[in-house]
Image (cartoon, helix red, strand yellow):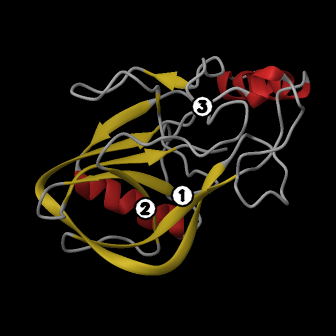
Amino acid sequence: MDSRRLITAAVLTVAALGLVGCDPNDPSGNGSGGSSAAAAAPQASAPAAGAAQPAPAGASSKAPTVDPGGDPGENCATPKLPAGHKIVQPVAQPKQDTMLAKATTFACDPNDGHWEATGSAARYLFAPHAKAELTNGAAGYTSVAVGELWNHIGDCLDGGQNVKPPQTCSSHPVYDITQGADGKITEIKEIWHS
């Protein structure tokens, strides 16, 4: 059994053991699972194993920061993004330093949630020395040239047949972007969701 299937099996097993689920009829996205004290605890309580990531340099350590690609926690609440980050879903392969993408909102699903595109596409420009990372599925990330990321976005939008391992296409193709003061993308990171 490869590591991705093993990790998926472990996650499904933990979910089956009673982690709080999401109520699809709950528009707040906070889930309604059980009425345990842990589910009713405030957001600042200790998160589920693997949910919290250390705060980035310069960020406040008062509230836990959640990796936008990570586990949103037991109550399926929207992950808190680090300051200056935004999750977007490209609608076309970027070209000539421009990406068309839609804003996203967080939605619950059986895997604790995902980012979902909303509204009309907006135009995003890339800074000259933008940093890019692609996911290797559940195994981690690889730093790549921005042009390689653009090709990856296009390949995934075209069905993923041209994507070469270890990269894969996420079932919800979204990206965490950081923008500079001029609004241009300075960092972009693919978010994995199986």
Image quadrant where one finds the N terminus: top right
Residue 103: give x, y in percent of width and height. 46, 68
Q: Which residue is mark 2?
A: 153
Rate crowding at label 2 as few (under 14), some (14 to 19) or many (20 or more) other CA atoms within 10 Å: many
Q: Is residue 138 left or right of residue 152?
A: right
**Alpha carbon distance from label 3 to label 2:** 34 Å
- Badge 3 amino acid: Gln
Q: Secondary structure at mark 3?
A: loop
The reply to whether callout 2 and callout 1 are in contact (CB within 8 Å) is yes
Of callouts 2 and 1, the N-terminal one: 2
Q: Is residue 74 left or right of residue 187?
A: right
Q: Which residue is mark 1?
A: 173
The answer to whether residue 11 of the structure is visible from this angle is no
Rate crowding at label 1 as few (under 14), some (14 to 19) or many (20 or more) other CA atoms within 10 Å: many
Q: Residue at x 59, y 46 (%)?
A: 78
Q: Which residue is mark 3?
A: 43
Residue 188: give x, y in percent of width and height. 31, 50
Q: Secondary structure at mark 2?
A: helix
Q: Residue at x 39, y 20 (%)?
A: 54
Image quadrant where one finds the C terminus: top right
